Amino acid sequence: MTEKIRLEAVTKLFNTRGTTTVALKPVDLSVRDNEFVALVGPSGCGKSTILNMVAGLMPASGGRVLYDGAPVAGANRRVGYMTQKDTLLPWRSTADNIRLALELKCRRTAKSEADDRVAQMIDLVGLKGFEKHFPAELSGGMRKRAALARTLIYEPETLLMDEPFGALDAQLKLVMLDQLQRLTQDRRMTVLFVTHDLAEAITLADRIVIFSGRPGRIRSIHDIALPRPRDVYKARFDPDFAHLHATLWDEMKDDVIAAGARA
Ligand SMILES: Nc1ncnc2c1ncn2[C@@H]1O[C@H](COP(=O)(O)OP(=O)(O)OP(=O)(O)O)[C@@H](O)[C@H]1O
Ligand SMILES: [Mg+2]
């Protein structure tokens, strides 16, 4: 399998009002084509920063970020990025927010074709009936789903997702995990997925990268060899799943507790 994303000794410093924050110590990570990699770790360990650098929204302070073997320089148009904070435009309806990606990416999409794709996406994320609502008229979970539809509509080859399902209720989350698994497998997408939810990471990922607290560095990387397709509803009752969950939690709990104490 070929390599899609590569981080080589990537570091990140932020200078804000005279203070320097070391967000990331040297990070080395390689993500293969069609691989699903989850990043987990305590708040502030640099997970969103890594996605921002892969998306080309900010440069690394040291080291290199490569996509398909070439350094990322400027906005990386091969990736779809669902950011941690949703960026729906308040003056556009749900349907028009989702359509925006098509307008920006492929201006020549015919109106009727665009209408069909928007309708399909609305259906996929379960927002039928809310097409004309504005973002302020949606719940937190609905906004997340609208942002997901907007990211998926132009079928990027790689998805960067930053806690996409955090605001969803537990049952709806399972439905969305199931859809995401299907979609990314069918379309052979590469996914870099940030989550605080270990069970969600084990359900979806081929590999889980555990970060230690700030300044972030990779503590360990774990292969998740559970067979696919995974039943997102039943997976967590499998003894192998429970064993993985216990092992990974042991690995990360001290950092999570320390980050909680700092906060
Ligand atoms: N644009 C920025 N300017 C200054 N500091 C920043 C910026 N973005 C991130 N940081 C700092 O870098 C560190 C890592 O932030 P980041 O958002 O990557 O963490 P995270 O792992 O995504 O955390 P969370 O789980 O809370 O989302 C934090 O200390 C944060 O304050
Ligand atoms: Mg973050």
Image (cartoon, rainbow, N blue to C red):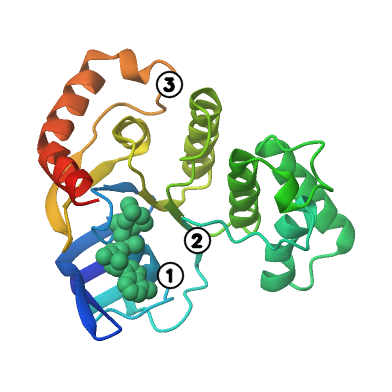
What amino acid is labelled 1 in the image? Ala
Is 106 left or right of 140, judged from the image as shown?
right
| Residue 116 placement (x, y as % from top left) | 82, 49
Earlier in the chain: of badge 2 and badge 1, it is 1
What amino acid is labelled 2 in the image? Tyr
Number of the label disc, if any, that sits on residue 194:
none
The quarter of the displayed image where residue 46 is located:
bottom left
On whether ligand 1 comes within 8 Å of the CB at mark 1, the answer is: no
| Residues under numbered marks 2 and 1 in contact, where contact means CB atoms less than 8 Å apart | yes
Which quadrant of the render holds ligand 1?
bottom left
Within 10 Å of disc 3 (Cα), the crowding (few <14, some 14-19, many 20+) is some
Earlier in the chain: of badge 1 and badge 3, it is 1
Earlier in the chain: of badge 3 and badge 2, it is 2
Classify mark 3: helix, strand or loop: loop
Q: CA distance from mark 3 to mark 2?
A: 26 Å
Circle 2 residue: 81
Circle 1 residue: 55
Q: Nearer the viewer, residue 112 or 127?
A: 127
| Residues under numbered marks 3 and 2 in contact, where contact means CB atoms less than 8 Å apart | no
Of discs 1 and 3, which sits in the foreground? 1
